[in-house]
Amino acid sequence: MYKQKIVYTKDLPEYIKDSSKVFKKNGNIKRDFYEEESLKLQYELVKLQKWIIDNDKRLLVIFEGMDTAGKSSTIKEFNAYLNPREARSVALPKPNSKELGQWYFQRYLKQIPNAGEIVFFDRSWYNRAGIELIFGFCTQAQHEHFYKQVNGVEEMLVDDGMLFFKFYLNISKGTQENRIKDRENDPLKSWKLSELDYKSMAKYHEYEVLRDKMFNISGTKHAPWCELDANDKKRARINAVRYLLFNIPYEGKDEALICGVDVAIVRLNH
């Protein structure tokens, strides 16, 4: 695995172009600007996938974050133009009775990529770092045992040549409340709502404490956490793509386009 690094730059379109063409009055980026920049990055992602297939590489990308932070939509950003035969998204349901008797990591590791494949985890083994503890789906002892093992598991994956990235999408409590209301009022998004979403919103500050614990313990040199300010979903998505592309030496990379990330959006925890 190539050691991940973060490079901040002002040589990004959102800083070079006239701000009135980039930003709305509320500070979020405009849809036209987002779509233009996103399309440029999609070409690079297609190049990346070809390099992964041609060189039998394996890419595993984990997405964690606050509820309603935009994990699924960010995965769609990555997956939009990839060959679906060699790229897939994994969102596991709660474990069944058989899986509850397995080693905790077992059902996740069954899903890791084969040679030439890209896999995106929409939530992962880090459920045990947050939601499982908050809602009593695991004991405190199981939670602490998870932290005794997770860094070793990830180091083994990386040592075996896995390209491994961990993204955390962070949003404010106010943003979370607004997105819950938006889902309530939009029939096309109502399927995204569950009773657990409302309970999670009430536990926002507990999530914050466990998030910081997760960064401190499992943000390592071999598997750092890339934290994204996702209060502006679109801006977070393009910077997630930039970060990943910057840290993989695939063939044909447009170095002028993939030159770093936005200091206002991205932070590395390691």
Image (cartoon, grey):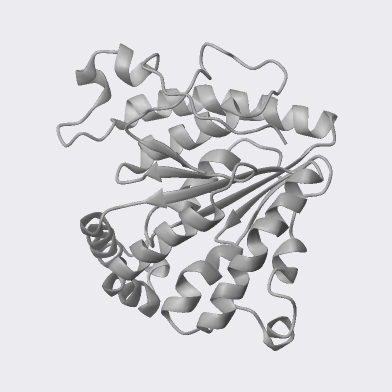
Q: Which residue is at the front of the view, 268 or 38?
A: 268
- Is the N terminus in the top left, top right, bottom left or bottom right quadrant? top right
Q: Residue at x 37, y 59 (%)?
A: 68
Q: Is residue 138 visible?
A: no
Q: Residue 160 sits in which quadrant?
A: top right
Q: Which residue is at the front of the view, 147 or 36?
A: 147
Q: Which residue is at the front of the view, 97 or 159?
A: 159
| Residue 175 point in image, percent of width and height | 25, 54
Q: Residue 57 sits in which quadrant?
A: top right
Q: Is residue 120 left or right of residue 63?
A: right
| Residue 83 point in image, percent of width and height | 71, 39
Q: Is residue 27 left or right of residue 205?
A: left
Q: Is residue 198 left or right of residue 95?
A: left
Q: How many marks?
A: 0
Q: Residue at x 16, y 37 (%)?
A: 26
Residue that lies at the very extreme toward the left in this rendered image: 25
Q: Is residue 56 left or right of residue 9?
A: right
Residue that lies at the very extreme toward the bottom in this rendered image: 97
| Residue 170 point in image, percent of width and height | 37, 51
Q: Residue at x 61, y 24 (%)?
A: 44
